[in-house]
Amino acid sequence: MNNSYLRTRKTVLLALFVALIIVMSVVPFIGYIPLGFMNATIIHVPVILGALLLGPKEGALLGFMFGLTSMINNSFRPNITSFVFSPFYGNEFGNGGIKSIIICFVPRILIGLAAYLVYRLVNRLVNRISKKEDSRSPVALAAAGIAGSLTNTLLVMNGIYFLFGSSYSDAKGVAADALYKVILSVILINGIPEAIVAALLVSVIGTVLLKLYPVNKK
């Protein structure tokens, strides 16, 4: 395949992933699942798949889009803690400002990079053990799904703790010294299931996509 064709295909696939992220963010109960106190999400899945298929730079762009949809959702469909995700929303507990921009974008931009690096590392190990060249290991894909999902959860929740500690604890109605227990409970209750779902989806869908569109071969 010539370079022009590959660039065009890469651009089209990137546009499709961006469109998928937007659709998942807009259609209720598909991308963001409202739980009252926060929104659980699977939007990191197309970010991870895009990074594996297209590369880490494109994965970072898709992560940026994820962060943007999160900011928009928390600005126009807020819940009690939406100030940690939107500089445009505030309530009696706090206002986001620049800190909410950090929470919204930095973890999401790093999703694709973490998934890409873990995939390459695990896939290389699997290839070495199996003595195959350039295999697309489902194990490596699952590991990438877990890495990308946990990157989002751990950075977001710990970012909230360090940047919004007292405001977030007030909004949650918990004592400041008990806040990290709440953070850990969210990581365990939401983050672990999200990581498992991401591992399954990335492994199954990624195996198909990497066979159909072997754009990023390493």
Image (tube, rainbow, N blue to C red):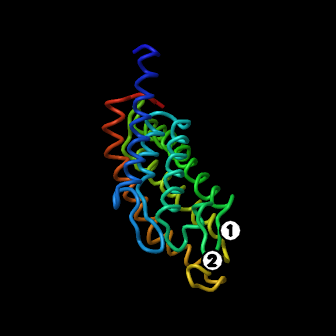
Residue 101 position in % (x across, y down): 63, 56
Residue drawn 57% across the image and 47% down it: 109
**31 lies left or right of 101:** left
Residue carrying label 1: 162
- For disc 1, the neighbor class at 10 Å (few under 14, some 14 to 19, many from 20) is few
Q: Which mark is residue 60?
A: none
Measuring from the top left, give residue 211's x and y in whole percent: 32, 32
Front position in the image: 169 or 184: 169
The amino acid on which the numbered mark 2 sits, given as a three-letter code, is: Phe
Label 2 to label 1: alpha-carbon separation: 16 Å
Per the image, label 1 sits on a secondary structure element best described as helix
Q: What is the quadrant of residue 160 in the picture?
A: bottom right
Residue type pointed to by label 1: Phe
Task: Give the mark, 2 or 1, whose residue is nearer the N terminus.
Answer: 2
| CB under 8 Å between discs 2 and 1 | no
Q: Which mark is residue 93?
A: 2
- Tell me if 160 is positioned left or right of 120 in this view: right
User: Residue reaching furthest top?
Assistant: 2
Give the number of marks: 2
Q: Is residue 206 above or below residue 148?
A: above
For disc 2, the neighbor class at 10 Å (few under 14, some 14 to 19, many from 20) is some
At 44% from the left edge and 72% from the top edge, which residue is drawn?
189
Residue appearing at x 66%, y 74% in the figure:
165
Residue 141, horizontal then vertical, whole percent: 41, 45
Q: Which x, y percent locates residue 102? A: 65, 56
